[in-house]
Image (cartoon, coloured by chain):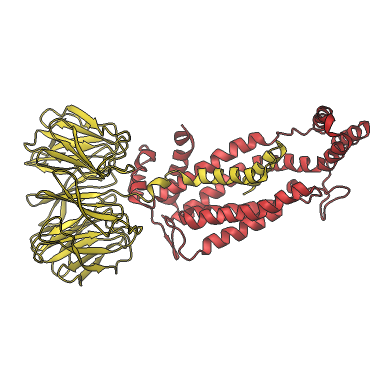
Chain colours: A red, B yellow
Amino acid sequence: MFDAVLIRPIINLLLVLYKFLGQETIVAVTVVTLLLRLALTPLQLKQQKTTKRQQELQPRLAELQKKYKKDEREKLAQEQMKLYKEAGVNPLGGCLSLIIQLPLMIGLYQAIIRVLASTPLQLLALPRDIYGWIPSLSTLIPLKSQFLWLDLALPDPFYILPILVVISSWYYQKLLTPPTTDPQSAAMSKQMMIMMPLMTGFFSATYASGLAVYFLISNLVGILQYFLFRSHYVVQPAGGESKGEKDTPPRAGRKAVNKAVSKG
Amino acid sequence: MSIWRNLADRLGSARFTAKPLRVVVLFAALLLLVGCGGGLRHESWPGLIAVGDTLYVANLEHVQALSAETGKVYWSYPSEDERAARPFYSTPVLAEDVGENGVLLVAGFSDRTVYALALGASPAERPDELWRFAEAGGQYVGTGTVASGLFLIGNGDGKVYALNIEDGSKAWEFATDDRVWATPVVVDDTVYVASLDHTLYALELQTGTEQWRVDVDGSVAMTPVLAGRDLWFGDFSSKLYQVDTQSGTISWTFEAENWLWATPVLDGSVLYFADVGGKVYALDIERRELVWDAPVVVDDAVRGRPALNGDGSLLFVAGYEKGAVYAIDTTTGTLRQSWGSPLENPGRLPSDLVTGDQRLYTLPILVSARVQAFSLAAGELIWSSPQGD
C-alpha cells in the first residue's frame, strides 16, 4: 500500500526527471527534493505557526503551573485547555501536517535508496517499482551514480558530504530553536541541536551518498525557507519582542491569556 | 530537518518527558526511514559448481568445498574465523588443466579481488592460495570464464580483465562504458562481453582488441548463450536478441514482459528463459516461435538461471522472493509442482540452480542453511549446509 501510493510514484518521478535532465542522478534527486519541499511548504509553515503560538503561550502556561499546586492538576489541566481554546491554539495542532509530511519523507528516502540500488540484490527489487506504461524507463537502469568523487549509491569515502550535512543540520536546528526561559525546554533544545546533526551525519556516512544529498538539499531549502518566511518561525520571548521581529500574537489570544491568568 | 524538531516538540507537549526516550524514538524513526532493505546490503547471491562428487561454493565471506553426497564441509577459504566483508556474487570457476590438480578461481564483491586457489590431490585437502589480483577499481558481480590459460572476468569499473591463470599477471584489459556483470563467453578466438552500457562487444581472445560491437536498448546483465553461430541474450528493456557472431549484427528480437536477467538454458533448439516478473518462456530458436502458447507464470521474481533435469522433461525455476522451486513440464508448459524448503524460513533464491546426479542444489540467502540439496524426483530435502539446520 505504502509502496504503491508513495514510493513507486516517487521512484518513477525520479526516473522521468533523470531521463529528461541529462541523465544525471544528482540532478534528479535534487529536483525531486526541491519539489517535495516546495509542496510541503504550506503545511510546514502552518505547522510552524502553530508551534510558534504554542511557544508564545509558554510563559502564561508556566504562570498557570505556578498558581496551581500538585493536588490541583485537574484544575490546572482545565485552565490550560481553556487558555489554548481561547487563544485559538490546538495543543495537538500541527499533528495533521506531521502525519502528512512524515510518510512523504519516508517515501522519498526509500525511493532514493531503491533507485540507486547499491548492490545487484537491491537492484533486483526495482523492476516491480517501475511503471510499464511510461515508455523506456527500464532502459535507464542502472542509473549513472558517479558525480565528482562520489558514487551516489555508496557512502562518501572522504566524508565530505556527511560533514556538510552535520554543519547544515546544526545550523538549521539552531535557527529553529526558539528562545526559552524554561530550563527543561532549553535542555531539550540543546540536546536536539547536538543529536539531530549527529544522527543525520551518521546516516549520511553509512548509507548511499544520494541520501546525504537529500539531507543536504533539504537542510539548505529549510534554511532558505526560514529566511524567506521568518515571521512564521521567530518566537517572541516572554516580556518582549524578539530581535528584528514585529509579529505579535493575535489580540484575541493575548486577551484570553491575560484573562485566564488573572482568573486563576 | 524541521520535521524532526517538530516531532520532538509534539512528543514534548504530549508530556512525553523522558528525554532519553525521545532521542531513542527519533533515532528509531530515522532508522526506519533508511533501514529498510538494509539486510540485503551484506548479502549476495552465492554460486556453486559441481565437479564430480565435490561442490565448490562461494558464499558470503568464504569459498567452501562440500561433499555432494552428504553436504559435509571439507574446507573453507579463508578459514571460518576470518570474516572480511567480501560477499561473493561471483561463482567459482575451475581451471582443470592448470597446476597438478586444477586451480579454483573466484572473485570477491566488496574486496574487489580475484583469488586463485591451487586445489589439493583430494577434495578434502585444503587448497593453497596461488595468487591474488586486486588491481580492479570496482566490485566483481559476474562470474569469470577460463580459456587458453586465461581467466576472463568483468568488473564494476567497466573493464574486462584477462589474467594469466599461472601467475595472476594481467594479459590485457578492455574498458566498456559501464559495469560488466555478465560472464564473458569464449568461442574459438573471440570473447564476447555484455555490459551494462547497453552493448555486446566481440574481442580478440589473446589481445583484447575489439572486433565489433552491437548496441542494444537496455543494460545487459544476462550471460549470452551460444547456439550455432548466434548468441542469444536479453536486457533490462525486456528484449531478447539474436546476434550473428560472424557479422556482428542483430538478426532478430523477441519482446518479453519484464527485465531479462537470468541466464537462459538451451536444450536442442529450445531456449528456456525467464523474466524478473516471473514469466517463463520456451522459444524454438530455429523457428523463432514460442513452444508454449503463453509463458508459464511462477508468480515470483526470477534471477537465477533455471536448470533442466536429466532427460530435459522438467525445467526447474527458482522464485526469488518466496524461496520456492517450480518444476515446469517442458512439453506442455504446465506447472507440475512447486516446493519450498521444509526449513522454517525458506529464505530467498537469487542464485543459479544447479542439477547433478538426480539432485537439485539451491543456495538460499537470508537463512543459516546456505546450501540445500533436494532429490530431483520428489523435491525432498536430502541435506543442508551448515549441517544441523
Where is residue B193 shown, x and y percent of the image? Answer: 20, 58
The answer to whether residue A213 of the structure is visible from this angle is no
Question: Where on the picture, by quarter, is residue B319?
Answer: top left
Q: Please tell me which residue lies in front, B276 or B153.
A: B153
Q: Is residue A252 left or right of residue B47?
A: right
Q: Please tell me which residue lies in front, A2 or A200.
A: A200
The answer to whether residue B105 of the structure is visible from this angle is yes
Q: Is residue B6 left or right of residue A103?
A: right
* Residue reaching furthest to the right: A262
* Picture layout, residue B308 above or below residue B56: above
Q: Please tell me which residue lies in front, A4 or A93.
A: A93
Question: Where on the picture, by quarter, is residue B121?
Answer: bottom left
Count of numbered labels shown in the rendering: 0
* Residue reaching furthest to the front: B388
Where is residue A171 shown, x and y percent of the image? Answer: 66, 58
Where is residue B59 shown, x and y percent of the image? Answer: 27, 51
- Quadrant that contains the C terminus of chain B: top left
Where is residue B83 shown, x and y percent of the image? Answer: 34, 57
Q: Residue at x 85, y 39 (%)?
A: A60
Question: Where on the picture, by quarter, is residue B107?
Answer: bottom left
Q: Please tell me which residue lies in front, A66 or A142.
A: A66
Q: Residue at x 16, y 29 (%)?
A: B293
